[in-house]
Image: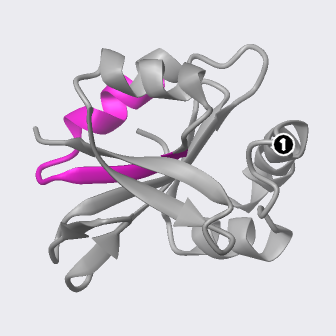
Amino acid sequence: LRHANLKDYDSISNMFKKTRKIFPYMREEYILQKIAEHKVIYQNDVAIIYNQYKKKTMVGDQTAVKGDWVLQEIVKDDNGNATKTFDNFLKCIDTTLWLKVLADNIRAQKFYEKFGMKEVGKVEWSNNTIKGKVYKYKP
């Protein structure tokens, strides 16, 4: 997998701008920080932002442990091949992978389930006004 560099920033930023409805919180500084930390994969016109937990962490109503991975965002351009890139990403995961998704984002949920991810919990944002689901993947 190829990690993003600063030359990729404009392309990645534009993908998130096109999906403002799904990622309204996405900010320029965040993307730049994650690129600098080498936590953005950019391949096949797909960007995956991820992290690894340094301590026990709550993921919605579930508990992740130190060393577990978290998929923070995944976005693709119009021609992006998210299936291929995500499959390659999963092959690099050696412990549990967690993610949170909006409860009404059925398309994303079906995408994750296609790779064997299981819905295991619930999450809420914005003072419990936005509902979400927690997914887990065990390699």
Q: What element carries label 1?
A: loop
Q: What residue type is labelled 1?
A: Lys
| Residue at 22% from the left image edge and 24% from the top image edge | 116
Residue 130 horizontal side relative to residue 74, left or right: right
Q: In which quarter of the image is the C terminus?
A: top left
Q: Where is residue 3 in the image (x, y as percent from the top left)?
A: 51, 51
Q: Which residue is drawn at 54% across and 27% down?
A: 108
In the shown orientation, is residue 106 left or right of residue 111? right
Highlighted magenta segment, given as a residue range: 85-101
On screen, residue 78 above or below 92: above
Q: How crowded is mark 1: few (under 14 residues within 10 Å), some or many (20 or more)?
A: few
**Viewer-proximal residue among 45 and 101:** 101
Q: Which of 137 and 29 is in front in this view?
A: 137
Evaluate whether residue 3 shows in this view: no
Nearer to us in this view, 120 or 1: 120
> How many circles with numbers are drawn on the protein?
1
